[in-house]
Image (cartoon, grey):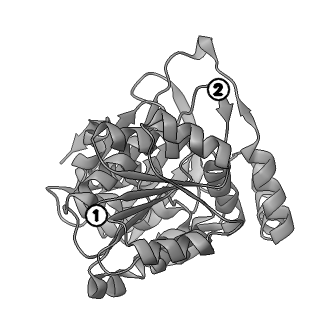
Amino acid sequence: MNEIWILGATGRIGRSIAAGLVERHRSVVLVGRDETRLRALARELGDAPTVLAESSLDGVARRITERAPAVVVNTVGPFGTTGPLIADSCPAGTHYLDLANELPAVTGMLDRHDAAVASGRCLVTGAGFGVLGTESATLRACADRPTPVRVRVDALADYRGSGTVGAVLAETMIDVFASGGFSYRSGRLTPDRLGAGAEQLALPDGRTATTAAAPSGELIAAQRGSGAPDVVAASKEIPTGRLAGLALPIVGALLRIPPLRRGAIRLLAGVTIKEDAAAGDPTTWARARVEWDDGSNRVVWLRADDGMDFTAAIATEVADRLVTGAGRPGAYTPGALFGPGLAEQAGGTFLIEDRVG
């Protein structure tokens, strides 16, 4: 069966993935909780079949086991919870991808590598700008060089257009704050201060932006892709400054309390993103700065447009490749499976800003 099931199909990213796959003449099944929105989307996409989700995803997981679709696309967070449930429900030969960027969710999926190999499944986690953006820049920077000693990756997503933040992005942002800081030191994943290492970057388009350390799946992908013993992942979404440095540990501790976490996600998900006509077209950047022990370094930027649209394009491309048999059994981040060219296929452009040695 060559069906591609899209969980959370009526959300902004889910709708875009579904539309993109239908344009490629793929057979999609739309899965969601809101029957009215689900039916409306199905009509827009040529009467695509639907599955109405129950109050939890357990029923959907059972249907996946029974129906054995070719690919399951999971856009429903929190991925640390939904990822294991859905991925483990996929029978032998059913491939899985999600949009996770939370550090525990990404590592948890990658830990399923051996089981996925044994069952002939391909599991891809982080199939969005979060993970692939900085991962692809790292892979491109390291392509023709020995193992570096130090890597820093920076994510600077730009989201435009009307609508709300949405649950997927809100959960990722809240979980970054709740997880506390981490970095790689001497090859070990080590607790670090959230928001450490603030750095002002001069972007290739002439703007400036400040990023600071944030634990995410991008940290794991950058270390795996480079092999460097010392790795930092940073984001422009992390507040910087003295007051932020004092407040972040307290905020993080509070967000680890389940009721407060759920409330914060609901509030953030409902925040309206207003169109700013004066801001111009959205520009999303990812950067990898890679250093070697001989003192040489290389900086690679990846440029894309709207971060959510880029995420949808990545997930669409990964799902399309999986349904045509281009993957291989195991658990991977998208760049590790398909290489940095995947980001270009989804609409990204690489820039090598600096190359010394």
277 sits to left or right of 111: right
Q: Nearest the camera: 298 or 262? A: 262
Q: Residues within 10 Å of mark 2 (few under 14, many from 20)?
A: few
Q: Nearest the camera: 48 or 337? A: 48
The percent position of residue 186, horizontal first and vertical second, equals 42, 77
Placement of 57 over or under 164, stated as above or below? below
Q: Residues within 10 Å of mark 1 (few under 14, many from 20)?
A: some
- Where, quadrant-wise, is the N terminus in this rendering? bottom left
> Residue visible at 63% across and 64% down?
78
**Disc 1 element:** helix
Q: Earlier in the sequence, mark 2 or mark 1?
A: 2
135 sits to left or right of 345: right
Q: Residue 229 sits in which quadrant? A: bottom left
**Disc 2 element:** loop
Q: Nearest the camera: 201 or 333? A: 333
The percent position of residue 192, horizontal first and vertical second, equals 61, 69
The percent position of residue 142, horizontal first and vertical second, equals 23, 56
The percent position of residue 188, horizontal first and vertical second, equals 46, 79
Q: Nearest the camera: 332 or 220? A: 332
Report, in whole angstroms, how far the alpha carbon at label 2 lies from the one at label 1.
33 Å
> Residue visible at 32% across and 81% down?
92
Three-letter residue code for mark 1: Ala
> What residue is shown with label 1?
336
121 sits to left or right of 130: left
Three-letter residue code for mark 2: Ser
Placement of 349 over or under 144, stated as above or below? above
Q: Which mark is residue 68?
A: none
Q: Is residue 201 visible?
A: no
Q: Are marks 2 and 1 in contact (CB under 8 Å)?
A: no
> What residue is shown with label 2?
162
